Image (cartoon, grey):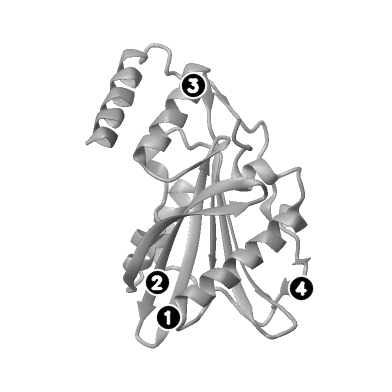
């Protein structure tokens, strides 16, 4: 009830500020080159060139192209032969709060059954990151997934958070950019998979360094 009230207040505030909400400048003067930003190797992980990412169905790909300017998909492998799939999708204009692409919808559109959908807080790079976790199952394929979305300098989980960020940037005449970060692997043990994914993400962020940290996990909480 309280959350719905807060959403209503934010929406009314946005409506009242309509004359000011005409963004004229994108936050990102130039797009980051995700292929260069994300290292090909970090920690105990390196790209597995033998794994080709699954290509989305044409209608799903067309929708992705409308939302994102860049999409990078890679599979990494460590010395144990364990593999992690990483997808990053960047959009230079996230001014529309409905543009955030929810992965449970994307996977369902690909024929997966979504199980155990949950929201959790992860401690990454000195921040508390609200993430979404789900188990996507299709026939004998069991894929635990962790993902989050940034909008501007914040990681946003639900509609309220997106509206707040949209309002804040809109009042400043700016258009926020954003990125989807998704990590998954094939496993019949979701809890073990999520722990492994967290370790992978810690190594990834350490490899990326501070320059693009805000892009991937937002700014530190003030």
Q: Do labels 2 and 1 touch, CB within 8 Å?
A: yes
Label 2, label 1: how far apart the Cα atoms are:
7 Å
Between disc 4 and disc 3, the foreground one is 4
Find disc 1 in the rendering and name its residue: 142
Q: Does label 4 or label 3 sit earlier along the sequence?
A: 3
Which residue is at the front of the view, 19 or 86?
86
Q: Earlier in the sequence, mark 2 or mark 3?
A: 3
Residue 161 location (% of width, % of height): 41, 36
Spatial CA distance of label 4 from label 3 is 43 Å
Residue at the far bottom: name it: 140
Using the image, tell me which numbered label, if any, was put on residue 135: 2
* Percent of width and height locating residue 120: 45, 55
Q: Which residue is mark 3?
A: 23
* Gap in angstroms between the C-alphas marked 4 and 2: 25 Å
- Label 1 environment density (alpha carbons within 10 Å; few <14, some 14–19, many ≥20): some
**Which quadrant does the N terminus fall into?**
top left
Q: CA distance from mark 3 to mark 1?
A: 43 Å
User: Could you tell whether 106 is left or right of 46 in the image?
Assistant: left
How far apart, in angstroms, are the residues tagged by discs 1 and 4? 24 Å
* 147 lies above or below 80: above
Q: Quadrant of residue 30?
A: top right
Distance Cα–Cα, label 2 vs label 3: 38 Å
Asked whether, in this view, residue 59 is left or right of residue 154, the answer is: left
Quadrant where the C terminus sits is: top right
Compared with 155, 26 (above or below) is: above
Report which residue position mark 4 lands on.
Answer: 44
Q: Which of marks 4 and 1 precedes in the sequence?
A: 4
Nearer the camera: disc 2 or disc 3: 2
> Is disc 3 surrounded by few (<14), some (14 to 19) or many (20+) residues within 10 Å?
some
């Amino acid at each position: 009830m309280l959350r719905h009230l807060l959403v209503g207040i934010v929406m009314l505030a946005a409506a009242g500020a309509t004359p000011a909400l005409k963004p004229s400048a994108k936050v990102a003067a130039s797009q980051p080159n995700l292929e260069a930003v994300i290292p090909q190797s970090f920690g105990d992980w390196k790209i597995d060139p033998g794994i080709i990412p699954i290509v989305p169905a044409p209608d799903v790909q067309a929708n992705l192209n409308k939302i994102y300017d860049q999409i990078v998909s890679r599979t990494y492998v460590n010395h144990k032969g364990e593999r992690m799939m990483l997808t990053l999708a960047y959009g230079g204009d996230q001014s529309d709060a409905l543009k955030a692409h929810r992965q449970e919808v994307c996977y369902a559109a690909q024929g997966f059954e979504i199980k155990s959908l949950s929201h959790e807080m992860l401690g990454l790079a000195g921040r508390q990151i609200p993430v979404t976790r789900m188990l996507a199952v299709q026939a004998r394929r069991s894929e635990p997934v962790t993902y989050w979305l940034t909008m501007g300098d914040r990681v946003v989980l639900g509609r309220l958070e997106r509206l707040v960020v949209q309002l804040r940037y809109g009042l400043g005449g700016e258009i926020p950019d954003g990125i989807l970060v998704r990590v998954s692997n094939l496993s019949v043990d979701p809890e073990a998979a999520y722990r492994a994914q967290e370790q992978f993400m810690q190594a990834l962020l350490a490899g990326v360094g501070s320059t693009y940290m805000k892009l991937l996990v937002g700014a530190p909480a003030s």
